Amino acid sequence: MSMKDYLRDVVTAACSKLGFDNAEIYFEKPKEEKFGDLSTNAAFLLAKIQKTNPRKFAEELVSNFDYDKSIIEKIEIAGPGFINFFISDNYYKKLIPEILDKKENYGRSEINSGKSVNLEWVSANPTGYLHAGHGRQLCLGKAIANLLEWSGYIVTREYYYNDAGNQMLNMGKSIYARYMQIFEPDFPFPEDGYHGEYIKDIARKIYGDKKDSLKNSESMDYFINAGEEYNFKLIKNTLGKMGVRHDVFFNESDLYKTGAVEKTLEEFKSKNLSYEKDGAIWLKMDETEGFQKDKVIVKSSGEPTYRLPDIAYHIDKLNRGYDIVLDIFGSDHGDTYKEVIYGVKSLGYPYKKIHVIIHQMVTLRKGDNVIKLSKREGHSYSLDDLIDDIGADATQFFFVMRGANTHLDFDLELAKEKSEKNPVYYLQYAFARICGVLRNAENIFPEYKDFNAENINPELIISNDEINLLKTLSLFPEEVENAALSFEPHKIITYLNEVAEKFHKFYHNCRIIDAENKAQSAVRLYICLAVKQTLKNGFDIIGISAPERM
RNA sequence: GCGCCCGUAGCUCAAUCGGAUAGAGCAACAGCCUUCUAAGCUGUAGGUUACUGGUUCGAUUCCAGUCGGGCGUACCA
């Protein structure tokens, strides 16, 4: 039982005594040490209902508290009516064996256990390699998937793509043109074609395999397939470099094969949610939900627009029985996903299970120079190059360190920097430092490895640096829960920063290995092991490595 | 024009349902290595939370408006 839960019981019991049964009280960690370890606003809420002075009410509440004085050192009323709880150091001293016992599971939560989630992300069509801008989504999704697992979900990682649409045809035509240019240098290149060098590579590869046998080809199929195969190889290679493995690669064309698209269209028609105009089929959009005009779902050419299969796809995912269907999109899709959800909703499917995470765009720069990221124009900076330039850890860290809903300014020079300027190293250095200390400990007194909770004398934990460090470690499970509930892995980074900061302070002020005082050394090594474990678990969530040496 | 998102220290960003004196890192300045990794630590300075009003015990947070930026506003995805 967490400290918050314990205190919630204490406060709710007191509220009941005073006649408030379903009080929605909450606790928070005060920003300042002098306000204790946890604080509640209960008095404000209830005083509001009763229209009395919060401060007075707080006094009345506190006098009705029934609590364990060995855990709660003192309770104070402060300011306009905050009730501050000071938790006894003894509570934190029990934490180390708990962390070391739970090991790689310390921080895991059960709040979502038994539930399943489908997370779909990246989902770039295989018209080219992933460029650096895709990195944000790739890394964000990777960390969110981990976070969801840590909160108890069973996670299905999914990649949705379409190998039959206009974009792919366009790519096929581009490859074909490059292929033809091998014979006829003036062969026209499509107006909206893909200009990248990789298109020429694919064309040369086809020429190598097929020579001139595809000259003046009517069908683009071979070129599209060759392009898809080539590009997917690149994409999967990049995913692999970042340690991402999707469980499902879902092809849009399957929705046509199974009749799912047709079925969805029939549902719209039979429920009178669509109509025909100018040879196209339109979906009626509800103005009261903020839509300005109706949207085409089948073009006059007979081809569906992306909306229809997208709606069918989301219905398909809902039908697969997930408790949550989660999508990650860039802000350039910020309007379109609403149309998709609206479509799902209007057909009566459980659209509330669908959650969408929108991330803002990335500005990539080297110092003061902004790097452009357009795929069609060619010469874009690939994600592969980014990973090779700055490393997988820095890539992962920089893309995840900020909230998704804010524009990300990604400075390559900073990310590349192998110095204290680079925020990645602050965390990893703390870990490497601990590993160094433990290596030294093995030489000086190897018996520390045989210690267990019984050999440790918690009374030797006396300094503020030690207690503050332990307090911070104790917050990890709730930080994981909070981050998971809001799908915000950057909160884990913010938290780990605090752990690292408290550790560095502790390291600086408290001599760990002291041959003259083995009992104390043992306690401090124990603390190190607990910090090491917590850092490692946090690194696993955000998806960076834990280097033993730096 | 309309819709969504954003605006916090010089720069990049935090701030747990609306809470107490708005916090970090970098940059600047001043210190700390014969002692477990100085990729570290300590200290100083830095703010009208874009602006104006509203809601209330209390607003960076909620509401309205103004200004500024990003993304959309296709029978592309």
Image (cartoon, coloured by chain):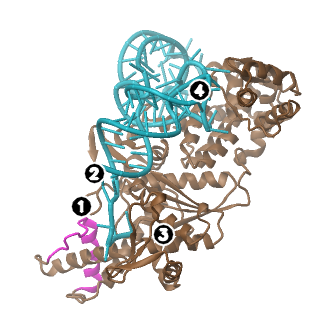
Q: Chain of mark 1?
A: A
Mark nearer the N terminus (1 vs 3):
3
Image quadrant containing the N terminus of chain A: top right
In the rendered structure, does residue A209 fall within the stretch colored magenta?
yes
Element type where label 1 sits in the image? loop
Q: Is label 3 on the same chain as label 4? A: yes
Choose top left, top right, bottom left or bottom right for residue A462.
top right
Q: Is residue A48 above or below residue A240?
A: above
Q: Nearer the viewer, residue A526 or A143?
A: A143
Residue A495 visible in image: yes
Q: From the viewer's perspective, is the residue at label 1 or at label 4 nearer?
A: 1
Relative height, residue A498 to residue A299 (above, below)? above
Label 3 or label 2, whichever comes before in sequence order: 3
Q: CA distance from mark 2 to mark 1?
A: 10 Å
Among the two numbered marks 3 and 4 on one chain, the one whose residue lies closer to the N terminus: 3
Magenta part of the protein: which range?
A188-211
Left or right: residue B70 versus residue A215 is: right
Tag 1 residue: A377
Question: Which one is earlier in the sequence, the residue at label 4 or at label 2?
Answer: 2
Residue A296 in picture, x, y percent from top left: 38, 73
Q: Are marks 3 and 2 on the same chain?
A: yes
- Secondary element at tag 3: strand
In depth, the one of A356 and A270 nearer the eye is A270
Residue at numbered disc 4: A504
> Do labels 3 and 4 touch, CB within 8 Å?
no
Magenta stretch containing residue A454, yes or no?
no
Q: Amino acid at mark 1?
A: Glu
In the drawing, what numbered circle is on residue A278? Answer: none
Instruction: Report how many numbered discs are placed on residues in the image.
Output: 4
- Mark 2–mark 1 CB contact (< 8 Å): yes
Q: Which residue is mark 2?
A: A372
